[in-house]
Image (cartoon, rainbow, N blue to C red):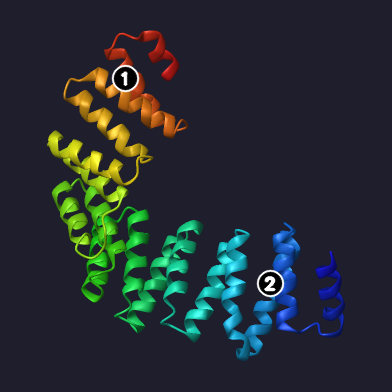
Amino acid sequence: TESFKYLDNINQFYPNSVEIVLNLGKLYSVTDQFNTAIVFLDKAFSLILADANYKELLSDVAYEFLQIGQNKKAITVMKKILEFDPSNESTMMELGVAYHETGEFKEAISYFNGVINDHPYSHLAWFNLGTIFNVNENWNDALFAFDMCLVISEKFTAAHYGKANSYIQLKEYQNAIDAFNESFLYDHPHSYAYCSIGECYEKLGDYSKALLFYEKSLEIDDSQSDAWIGLGVVRDLKNQPQEAKKFIEKAIKIDPDNSEYWYIFAELLLKLNSNKEAEKAF
C-alpha cells in the first residue's frame, strides 16, 4: 500500500517517467491487478521507444508481460530488444518459448527465417526454427534447422536433443540414439536422454539395452516416471507380467494423473486375470 501511494504521488508530477510507470506496472502485476498492469506496461514500452536511453529496461517490460501471460505483447517487446541487440541470446531463447506458447507458428517461422537472412550464423535462430518445426510436426524441416544450428555451434546440446526428437517422430530410432550419444560428447547425460534412448531400443526390439538405459535413467533421477513405465512395458514384453506390475505401479505412484499409465496398467491387469482391478484402472 505504501509503495502504491508513493509511486502514485510521484507519477502525478512525473507522468512520463519510465522508471515510475514501469514500477507501477510491476506492482499491479504482483498484486494480480493484471488489466491495470498492462496499461502501465504498455505505457512504459511506449516511453522507452521514445527515448532509447532507457532501452535496457525493455527486458523488464518483456519479463513482466511473460509473467502475466501476455505472450504476444512480450513478443513485440522482445523483437524490439533484438533490433537494438541482435546478439542478445537470452532474449532470442525466450522469444522462441513465447512463440511456442502463443501457437503463432507461421509468424514464428517467418520471423526466424528473417533473422537468419540477416544473421545466417545465429545458431539460436536456427534452433528456434527447428523447435517450431518440431511443434508443427514438420520433422524433416526441423532436422535441417537443427543440423544448421549444430554446424554453427556443435556443443549446443539442446539442438542434439531436438534432432533426436525429430528422428523419434520419424521412427528412425537408431538415428535418434546416435543424436543423443553425440550430445554426450559435450554435456553430461541426464535422466531424460537415457530414458529416451531406452524407449528407442524398446521400439527396435532390443529389450536388454532398453532395460539397461531405463535403469541408467533412474540412477540419475528415480522420479523419472517414464523410465519406470518403460521398465514395466519391457518386462511385460519379455513375458514377466508380475515384475511389470511393480514397475508400472511405481510410475503411477509418481504420476497418478497420467491416463496412459493407467491404460497400460489396466491392459496388464487383464492379462493377470485381475478383471475388477482392470475395470477400476480403465
Front one among 242 and 101: 242
Q: Counting other residues with Cα less than 10 Å from the Cα at mark 1, is it few (<14), some (14-19), or many (20 or more)? A: some
Residue under the point 36% across and 41% down:
224
Query: What is the secondary structure assignment of the residue under circle 1?
Result: helix
Circles 1 and 2: CB atoms closer than 8 Å: no
Lateral position of residue 14 relative to residue 200, left or right: right
Judge whether 19 appears above or below 179 on screen: below
**Residue under the point 65% across and 90% down:** 51
> Which of the labelled discs sits on residue 267, or is there none?
1
Mark sitting on residue 34: none
Q: Which residue is pictured at 26% across the width and 65% down the height? A: 146
Q: Residue 155 appears at what percent x and percent y?
A: 25, 69
* Quadrant position of the C terminus in the picture: top left
In whole angstroms, how far apart are the C-alphas of marks 1 and 2? 53 Å
Name which quarter of the figure residue 68 lies in.
bottom right
Please tell me whether residue 55 is drawn above or below residue 262 in the rendered image. Answer: below
Q: In x, y percent, where is residue 8? A: 84, 74
Asked whether residue 211 appears in the rendered view, the answer is: yes
Q: Give amino acid for label 1.
A: Glu
The one nearer the camera, 215 or 100, is 215
Residue 3 as seen in the image, left or right of residue 61:
right
Q: Estimate how packed mark 2 is, as few (under 14), some (14 to 19) or many (20 or more) residues with alpha carbons within 10 Å.
A: many
Question: What residue is at 22 percent from the left and 71 percent from the top?
Answer: 154
Which residue type does callout 2 highlight?
Leu
Residue of label 2: 41
- Give left or right: position of 208 versus 117: left
Image spot of residue 153 (x, y percent):
26, 74
Compared with 41, 202 (above or below) is above
